[in-house]
Image: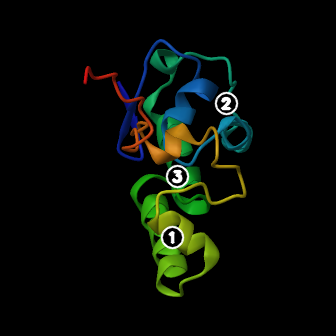
Amino acid sequence: MARISGITIPNEKQIWIALTYVHGIGRKISYDILDRAKIDPTIRVKNLNDGEVSKIQDIINADYVVEGELQRIVTGNIKRLKDIKSYRGIRHAANLPTRGQRTRTNARTRRGKKTTVGGTAKKSATKT
């Protein structure tokens, strides 16, 4: 089991896919890291030796912001937007889409489960 940046990456996957399990590393950056480390991207994680794993770890530590530090930076950016009361910050605070999507329909992922507003349901007929 190889650990990179505090994450245990899966043994059975190819190394270029396994690196994407680390928050902040996508497919493009994964290929760039492996290219600089001179490691074949299609090799399985279980076939890597300790030297190759440490080489990958050194490249990530030197040039990329990943995992907890990246999450702190993103959270700080959102907090700054909220503090200066920018439009995007207000949308973040209200749990609404921040990039101009419509909210009359859709946006269920961001807004949460639909709640029925009182007064819209039909009243049942009563006998007089």
Viewer-nearest of labels 2 and 1?
A: 1
Instruction: Give the left or right position of residue 12, taking residue 86 as reference.
Output: left
Name the residue type under label 2: Ile
- What label does residue 17 carry, if any? none
Along the line of sight, the residue nearer the viewer: 80 or 63: 80
Residues at marks 2 and 1, CA–CA distance in whole angstroms? 37 Å
Q: Kindly check if marks 2 and 3 are in contact, taking CB atoms under 8 A apart as contact.
A: no
Residue 39 badge: 2
For the point 41% across and 36% down, the residue is 113
Q: Could you tell me residue 26's position as x and y percent?
A: 64, 39
Say which quarter of the image contains residue 79: bottom left
Say what secondary structure mark 3 lies in.
helix
Label 2 crowding class (10 Å Cα cut-off): few <14, some 14-19, many 20+? some
What's the CA distance linking mark 2 and mark 3? 14 Å
Instruction: Identify the mark nearer the N-term, 2 or 1.
Output: 2
What amino acid is found at the position of numbered circle 3 in the picture? Asp
Q: Measured along the vertical axis of the image, is residue 124 above or below residue 116?
A: above
Q: Secondary structure at mark 2?
A: loop
- Where, quadrant-wise, is the C terminus in this rendering? top left
First in sequence: mark 3 vs mark 1: 3
- Image mark count: 3
Pick the front one: 90 or 18: 90
Q: Is residue 120 left or right of residue 38?
A: left
Q: Which residue is mark 1?
A: 78
* Amino acid at the residue labelled 1: Ile
Q: Report the residue at 53% width, 27% height from top.
A: 18
Kindly state the secondary structure of the residue where label 1 is placed.
Answer: helix
Expressed as whole percent of the image width and height from the top left, the position of residue 109 reads: 51, 39
Q: Which residue is mark 3?
A: 58
* Circles 2 and 1: CB atoms closer than 8 Å: no
In front: label 3 or label 1: 1
